[in-house]
Image (spheres, rainbow, N blue to C red):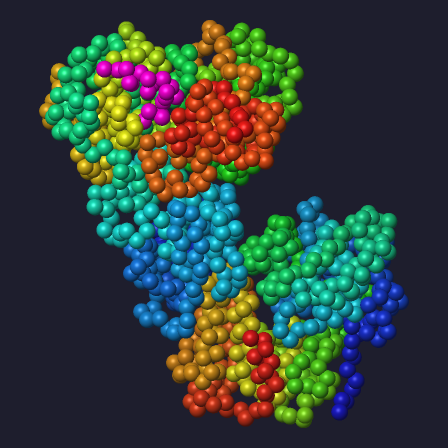
Amino acid sequence: MMEDKIRINELCYSTLSSDKPNTFETYVDQGGYSTWKKIVSSSMSKKEIIELVLKSGLRGRGGAGFPTGRKWSFINQDSEDIKYLVCNADESEPGTCKDRDILRYNPHALIEGMLIASYAIGAEVAYCYLRGEFIDDVYSTFKTALYDAYDNKLIGKNILNSNINIELHDLIGAGAYIVGEETAMLESIEGKKGFPRFKPPFPAVKGLFGRPTIINNVETLASIPKIIENGPEWFNSVGTKDSPGFKCFSVSGHVNKPGNYEIPLGTPFKKLLDLAGGMKNGKKIKAVIPGGSSVPVVPGEIMLETNMDYESITKAGSLLGSGAVIIMDEDTNMVEVIHRIARFYYSESCGQCTPCREGTGWMYKIIDKILKGNGTLEDLKTLESIPNMISGSTICALGDAAAMPVESFIKNYKEEFLNYIKTQEEVVDNNYTNNKEFVMQQK
Amino acid sequence: MKIKINNKECSFNKGETIIQIADRNGIHIPRFCYHDKLSIAANCRMCLVEQVGINKPQPACSTPAMEDQEYFTKSELASNSQKNTMEFLLINHPLDCPVCDQGGMCELQDQALMHGRVKSRYEQEKRIVMDYKIGPLITTNMTRCIHCTRCVRFGEEIAGIKEFGAFGRGEGMEIRTYLKSAIDSPMSGNMIDICPVGALNAAPSHMKGRTWELEEVKHISSHDCVGSNMDLHVLDNSVFRVVPHENKKINEVWISDRDRFSYEAMEHTDRVKKPIAKINGRHVEVEWEQAFEIIYEKINKVKFNKSAGFVSANSTVEEQYLFQKWLREININNIDHRVSQNKFEYEDELIFPKIDINIEEIENIESVLLIDSNITYEQPILSHKIRKAYLKNAKINSIHSYSYNYNFDINNSFLVNPNQLAETLIDIVEYLTIITINDKSLKKFTIPDGIKKKFKGLSNKKIIEISNDILTKNSLIILGSNLKNHPDYAFFKILIDIISTLTKSNKAYLGNNSNEAGAYLTGCLPNKTEALRGIKNNGLNVYDSIIGNMECYIIYNLELIDFYYYSELKNSLEQAKFVLGFQNFITEEEKSYYDVILPLATIFESPGTFINIEGQWQSFVQACQPHHDSKEGWKILTKLRSIFGANVENSLDYIDILNEVDSSIRDYKPFENLEYKNIDIKNNSHNGSLIRSGGSSNYYIDNIVRRATSLNNVSLSKNSISVNRRTLEQNNIDMSKNKVLVKQGENSLLAELIIDENVSDDCIYIINSNKEHYDLGKQYEPIIIENV
């Protein structure tokens, strides 16, 4: 059992302790918007805010883990130019659902975070771009929260009778994974097709409508109010030196209690697994995808020795990514898993640049052939070579995202592929008929 | 600033990309999506190169060069990346090179040879894409498409009409038109050239020949006054295909569809194959010698002062020179080429189509005023230059009798009835006179009293805005070519000259013909000879010659409908004793007016020179031998000169002719200012009735394009007239019916009615695109509209 209690849900999920977590009143009762009011009234300088965020060591929670304070400092906050803030709420990475719960249960933290960030970078217009599939419930919750904030004069013209003007717009996508890529999102906001832009120029120089733009993840922005309220020391007192603070993990797969858990970075994976109720049916852990479907898979035994922070997971051969932890037990058929993942990237590639457009389909088709028992050793050799051909040569990271899982699945579970080829039978004697049906339905 | 590419030191300017620097230094980097005239897409990933210190390959097309960096285009990282991209590009490409028109000139084929694998590792099913018909000029085979999006960017950036787009995503992405409609841009054919694969191919030459069988001959376009450079691809002594030839000063790397596809006319059934003579009332084919005998005999019988010769402004300088020389040698002085002109006032003062600046400078102009010019369709290359200026924030204003479609946005547009065009220009002159009253440089400049008399007080707000744009900016005023039919054309020229003097702006008088400047310079005029020298015995102009019932008419490369006084000409020809034609083509109907028709080689079968609107001489060689029994114009005319007794050397060669023309007129400085102080201003417009306007269809302007089948399949509505609602109401036309009757004099035409608010009031807008339109009557003449 756990030796000491883990601090859980203290930052982005703090309102979960209340009955009505997403209301304006709950948020204000918990001290919400006090930071924003303080900034507006005491005219806390932009530099100070950026300094605080820099000090806290907060890293972007969208997947890349770039220090947020540094990102903000790329923009000249004092220039007269029009600048924009964009909140990336297009959470589509398979396995990830942390932002959805922030939008659903703590939307005001995000709104306050966006206001503070807009103020800090000198933007007067901010957009929150929500994933298309959020339209049924999350979107309306967020919209209600946005209206409440407007009604309370926290957003808009002359906020709280100051001379600060910030407009906050919400937008909803049309369901393309690629729009989660920040420059594709900018294109989409501009009303164009979601094609990522080549860089340079980077968005901080030439972003939305050609203006300097900062794009942050929902969790990143929702963390800002409390970091400023409680001070950076409060935040970086937990976590490790290079990965300070709390992070939301979306745990899914063969565990008893799948769900979102906000825990300090650096927590051992074992403890996260315990929080999630341990393995289902007492099975042995086989593999973990620790950061969303686009990161390399890590064998279970290595994962059990790993802590959940950026550096440790990198050492284990994968990436922390968006914090979507997909846990698979001993009965999992790894060829089927990669078949499903490869199909996802095949259908979500935007088609703009060659390696990804052509490569994702090629990989999927070979895996499909192997899974159907028609594969040859030559096919496996070809499949092994494709990820290397794609990664690093595309405009955006989708190419790498599609390549990394394939590469790691073959590296770690090559014998399963070989068994399909040699015996043309499934090597794992599993009872995953349900899972198979699920895959069939998706097709 | 300096970088090293493959250890070679290269200097560069800030902001330049690796591929630009490499291209300038002759270092090859493979590419598909990059095109130096288009924006950067960086999507093909073929140009990946190694930047020392970065472990990921960098796209050379979108990576700005960094001071003191080193790049390698053939290192292991670079060539592996290129090889990988090539493999990806080929997995879904059908590799059907043996049946692909692009084979042999395909960028994909070439680069696959250099960077591809010997054998494909891809064994799965290939993508197949449905093809849509996009019109008669371009065939599509989108399965071959590699999604470089050059055609999409061409539409957005160059043509200014967004026609192609990328639909769907991932492997299912397709390039196609949005509305499954045909491509409309008059420059659409360029998409064929920029397509790096065989996805877009020229329809008229589709599947008719292979690239390696073709011979390339440089040529000059013959359908507008720009003189685009192009390459003719010749197969079996016939033009097979036309592609642009880069000329940075004129057409860059583009040509209009009209220049690209007009060659189809060469094989038209209307071609005159052998000399034709009317013997005993019947037209029969005769040998050249016999034809010459008849000509000699007949011409010697007619009175020279009762004879007239008309030459096409599309003919070459050499032909025009020899034509007038021959006629003047036999004392025929009634020579003219201005067959589409309506009135001939101020003949001494008005010189040919011209432009005050070079074509390449148009893109730096800050403001353009278009005067009734449908420039996007009439002069696609000039329109492209204006579009470039527009993209650099130039203000484009337009005064017109029809709201034409342009491939740029109009700042201020002013729709007037053609009868009020002159008034509108006078308004501008009036406003400018007041504004520039203190300009000392204009002290010596006086406005003719005739114009001053027409000043009538305060101007319209739009007119003031337009005038201010010309005055305050570096401007260009463009007079549309269709206005030549307008009775006030000369007056417009004077008004524009005044406006440009007052505002110190540039002006351009456009022409529809490829060599109008040549026709002036060679002296194909009744009152001027070579190099525009005056002559003792002035001849009659085309109008006077036609109504003067000559005994003999000599018509060189002109169809009867090319004449503004078409019906009058037909009458005169019927009564004439002898009518001689030099023709590429003849219709059965027109044949009856001629006594002798000599088969003339087309411009593709003859060497020659054109002088464009800038005054630029451009010579071209013979692309193929004359078809059938036709002969080059210079040979026929030289022979005739010798038959009629001129002292012509037997061994005379084309080059000798060119040298002779050159020495006699080349040094002439044509672009002098007009002198019009003493001109008595007449206003020729017909007032108080409905007026016909419209001009010729883009693809019906000369005898060649009229017979280019594919081009003529582009424009769909053939027999329609456009009128605005107000005019229809005033004339009690039943708008529920789709047919109306229009009448000019005794002629009438039943036509489809289009209610079109782009037409000005009291105007019936007809685009001449078939003979019936000419049979109906003249442009800018009164017209009546009635219910059927």
Q: Over which residues does the magenta segment extend?
A: B559-577
Q: Quadrant of the C terminus of chain A?
A: bottom right
Front residue of this view, candidates A235 and B292:
B292
Which x, y percent locates residue A379?
41, 79
Residue in the picture at 41% in, 73% down: B124
B474 is higher (above) or lower (below) than B138: above
- Could you say which quadrant of the image residue B265 lies in? top left
Front residue of this view, candidates B738 and B639:
B738
Q: Is B465 on the left-hand or right-hand side of A414?
A: right
Residue in the picture at 17% in, 34% down: B629
B495 is higher (above) or lower (below) than A315: above
Which x, y percent locates residue B251?
39, 38
Is residue B538 visible to the viewer in this orientation of the structure?
yes
- Could you say which quadrant of the image residue A384 lies in? bottom left
Which x, y percent locates residue A148?
84, 59
Residue in the picture at 32% in, 11% down: B548
Is residue B372 visible to the viewer in this orientation of the structure?
no
Q: Is A422 on the left-hand or right-hand side of A281?
A: left
Q: Quadrant of the N terminus of chain A?
A: bottom right
B518 is higher (above) or lower (below) than A112: above
Numbered disc total: 0
The residue most toward the left is: B650
Which x, y percent locates residue A36?
82, 59
What main secondary structure does the magenta stretch of the protein show?
Answer: helix
Residue in the picture at 37% in, 56% down: B197
Is residue A284 highlighted in magenta? no
Front residue of this view, candidates B502 and B13:
B502
Q: Is B264 on the left-hand or right-hand side of A241?
A: left
Q: Is A107 on the left-hand or right-hand side of A131?
A: right
The residue most toward the front is: B788
Is residue B575 highlighted in magenta? yes
